[in-house]
Amino acid sequence: MGIQKPAWLEALYTQKFFAGCSYHEAAKKNEKNVCCLDCCISICPHCIPSHRFHRLLQVRRYVYHDVVRLEDLEKLIDCSNVQAYTINSAKVVFIKKRPQNRQFKGAGNYCTSCDRGLQEPFIHCSLGCKVDSVLKHCKDLSPYLRRCSTLTLGPDFFVPQDMADDETTNETPHSTIVDSDEPMMSWSSSSSGSEKHEHGLH
């Protein structure tokens, strides 16, 4: 038998995201929307300083399902043939399968695992469906896994104001936020050129 699901991948499936963080119950913006791949747990923005040197993957919501940016996921695992969707100018993929009754069997592609209708040339509707398909047919996930020692959160990641010095600062833990010339969301464009993250919180 080859490599089954790595612990971080299992955590991505099993951890509950967008629930309140029990460690920061009294804090605002305490939804757990980050997966720490090294600890294999879901965390909220207030937890990030404790995990700032770990690999962090932001989880987003799209039509009531958990998704991750394709660009981030591609650093961890081969996502070819998984259908991606565009939100806020970034491509995202669903984490878990989304079964759909194939009531009208027309022409076109269907997910290999759950029969959801897909656009050409995709054959998996989610990361979960691709992983299930690979394990079913190849029994080994290792050729699809990629070595990734660092993974940081994107420049659009929301940092609660009470964690920053004041409302105008863009200072954040420098190991988790990186600047970008092309911010994913328009409201972050005013701060995207800041270089203050070099002197972030420690």
Image: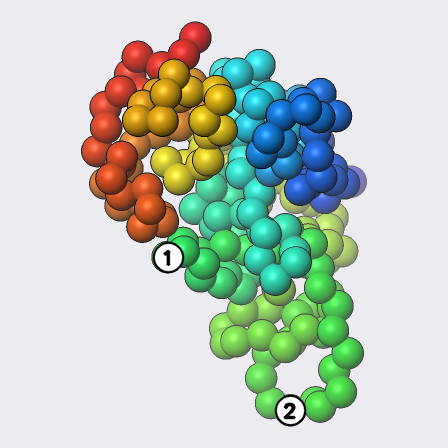
Q: Is residue 55 left or right of residue 131?
A: left
Find residue 27 and report its horizontal and vertical position in percent.
Answer: 62, 25
Q: Reply above or below: 19 against 150.
A: below
Find residue 156 and report its horizontal and vertical position in percent.
Answer: 39, 39
What residue is drawn where x is 70% and y is 34%? 20
Q: Secondary structure at mark 2?
A: loop
Closer to the observer: label 1 or label 2? 1
Quadrant of the snapshot with the C terminus? top left
Disc number at residue 89? 1
In space, the residues marked 1 and 2 are separated at their CA atoms by: 30 Å
Label 1, residues with CA under 10 Å away: few <14, some 14-19, many ≥20: few
Rendered image coloring scheme? rainbow
Label 2, residues with CA under 10 Å away: few <14, some 14-19, many ≥20: few
Q: Secondary structure at mark 1?
A: loop
Determine which quarter of the picture holds residue 168: top left
Kind of residue indicated by mark 2: Gly
Q: 45 or 149, which is in the foreground? A: 45
Find residue 23 and report its horizontal and vertical position in percent.
Answer: 71, 20
Q: Is residue 142 visible?
A: yes
What residue is drawn where x is 74% and y is 82%? 102
What residue is drawn where x is 57% and y is 43%? 59
Find residue 136 and report its horizontal and vertical position in percent.
Answer: 76, 56
Disc number at residue 106? 2
Q: Is residue 130 left or right of residue 60?
A: right
